[in-house]
Amino acid sequence: MELHVGCAMWTHPAWPGRYLPQPLPPRERLRTYGSWCNAVEGNTTFYAVPSPATVSSWVEQTRPDFRFLLKLPRLITHERRLIDVREPVAAFVNTIAPLGPRIHALWIQLPPSFVPAQLDTLSVFLRSLPRSYRYAVEVRHRAFFEDPRWERALEELLGEHEAEWVPFDTTALFAEPPSTADEVEAWAKKPRLPRRTRALTRYPVVRYIGRDDAEATARGWTPWLDTVVQWLAEGRTPTVFVHTPDNVDAIALARRFHDEVRARVPELAPLSEPIPVGPPTLF
């Protein structure tokens, strides 16, 4: 029984001295983050394919049971829109291959302009991908959430390819008007979509964004506690990523989510002990 939790990044300016040691060399940041969380979103791969040296550093800094959800480069998903992408897909997959079992899934985040009429393109693309990886698809066009025909069509397509549908739950973010500058920015940029809690595979992935107030974030994830507990009872292995608009406390909140699930499912193993922020004291 496993539950992976993490954040949208493994480094944040507010974390050293607050949750992580300070100073913290760049090549130690992922290792130290990994003492708090056992998964991370690989958002940086959307903007650039990492160098082999960078991938080697990721391997060196993480345990084999750590998990990356790696986003496919935007050249593939947003610029070429899944068409004529065999070469960039092969280059990306070859570069990240040393991560081995650390790759939870390759994350296909599609733009809001990806509409139901393009499902055939997605089907052809999924069929072309190497079978050695799992795949997780995130869509943002409202028709997939509001029209049962298109929701069913996407579920069936993903089911054929054993791919997961990644929900990005923003309901807590939009539950009340923004109260911080970062919440205002998040209101302008984040999708406002219905919460979706149905898993398609043994490895469901959840992206949840709360508020800059930690307690409001924790109250907002209550439905996910119920869902994750049920998934574990069904023999699934969930991964939950916790975001907040400023992400200052996201690393602690992700760990708190794991603790709250474990309080309901005692047989779930605890996370490792975090690396101390500072040296131990005598008193």
Image: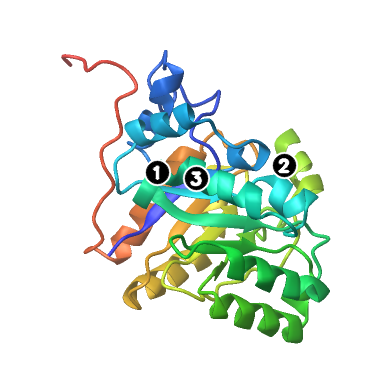
Mark yes or no: residue 186 visible: yes
Q: Nearer the viewer, residue 219 or 205?
A: 205
Which residue sits furthest front?
87
Residue 106 shown left or right of residue 30 in the figure: right
Q: Please rate how many residues cluster around mark 1, counting C-alpha atoms within 10 Å: few if below 14, some from 14 to 19, many from 20.
A: many
Query: Which residue, given by chain and number where applicable, does mark 2 sit on?
Result: 183
Say what amino acid the circle numbered 2 marks: Glu
Q: Nearer the viewer, residue 278 or 118?
A: 118
Q: How far, Cα to Cα, is label 1 from label 3?
A: 10 Å
Q: Residue visible at 74% across and 44% down?
A: 186
Q: Residue visible at 34% across and 37% down?
A: 62
How far across and down, in percent of the image, does residue 5 sit? Answer: 42, 51
How far across and down, in percent of the image, does residue 166 sit? Answer: 58, 63
Query: Which residue, given by chain and number where applicable, does mark 1 sit on?
Result: 99
Disc ID at residue 94: 3
How far across and down, in percent of the image, does residue 257 sit? Answer: 42, 53
Helix, strand, or loop for circle 2?
helix
Seen in the picture, residue 200 relative to 170 is either above or below; the reply is below
Q: Which mark is first along the chain, 3 or 2? A: 3
Residue 22 shown left or right of residue 129 in the figure: left
Q: Which mark is first along the chain, 1 or 2? A: 1
Q: Quadrant of residue 175?
A: bottom right
User: Which callout, 2 or 3, points to the residue nearer the camera?
Assistant: 3
Disc ID at residue 56: none
